[in-house]
Amino acid sequence: MNTAQLNRMHSGKGFIAALDQSGGSTPKALSQYDVEESSYTNDEEMYTLVHEMRTRIIKSSAFDNEYILGAILFENTMDRKIDGDWTADYLWEKKNIVPFLKVDKGLADLANGVQLMKPISNLDELLTRAVERNVFGTKMRSVIKEANAEGIRQVVEQQFEVGLQIFAKGLVPIIEPEVDIYSTDKEKSEEILKEEIKKQLSLLGKDVKVMLKLSIPTVNDFYTDLISDPHVVRVVALSGGYAQQEANDKLAQNHGLIASFSRALSEGLFANQSDDEFNTKLGKTIKEIYQASIT
């Protein structure tokens, strides 16, 4: 584990940029960037186009470590290069931004009010490659749709079980049990979720470190005790479908919680923008997310 990266993630000011759309979410990400499906004919062409989009974001002068602590990558992005460097190396060596990798393979079908992660069949090989590529940590997502105590317990147990495998490889796992922002019992789900997370944290060895990526809570500052837990490097928030301004407004009401936004980060960025237009829009967005993250 890179100590300089660990210290930056634990105490640095800023937020995490989520650049990890994969598989089925990539066409939507490209469409929002004004690159339609007619622009590519197969997955390789699609991933090349999305890498060009991510490269444009990462190389932008607005994508600055004064505001951004880390960036989450998709496997395909990790295995590509920017200006001759592996993407993770470019982020850290050229930008001083900590690289993470999305490792989950998507969601299982809904059961007990939740969607667990699908099995990650190649996890050990993927983690070995991530270590070779100088990645610091990983991210994996589950979704909670209902305040079902059994389902939420299963989500958290699965997340921590896989998280311990990841930590054993020398990487810091981001545990991400997302609560659907449109859930009719979101607040109750969050109450159950926090208790299950605290239970799992209490079982960890004293040297084990994790991060948490959670939906912005219904009750402000609800996750303060998780933020202060000695096992937790950082608690970050996903935008979860909120528009950029609403996500920022809600985040700013939660002290110590920082952003890890995806859609809210890339909102308003388009392929046909000039570099000046692109950088100006991205810079404005980054500064607004940063301000919401340093409350």
Image: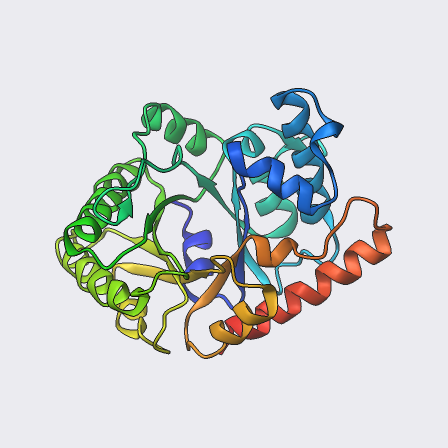
Which residue in the rendered view is the most extreme toward the front? Answer: 184
- From the top left corner, tell me how far across and down residue 55 is, in percent: 69, 41
Number of marks present in the image shown: 0
Is 229 placed left or right of 18 in the picture? Answer: left
Is 221 placed left or right of 263 in the picture? Answer: left
- From the top left corner, tell me how far across and down residue 271 is, in percent: 78, 44
The residue sitting at 62% across, 43% down in the picture is 29
Residue 160 visible within the image: yes
The residue sitting at 49% across, 60% down in the picture is 239
In this rendered view, identify the residue nearer to me: 130 or 163: 163
The residue sitting at 14% across, 59% down in the picture is 199
The residue sitting at 29% across, 65% down in the picture is 185
In this rendered view, identify the residue nearer to me: 227 or 46: 46
Residue 22 visible within the image: no
Task: Describe the colour scheme in one phrase.
Answer: rainbow
Is 153 placed left or right of 165 in the picture? Answer: left
Q: In this view, does 192 lie above or below 52?
A: below
Q: Is residue 66 above or below residue 274?
A: below
Q: Quadrant of the N terminus?
A: top left
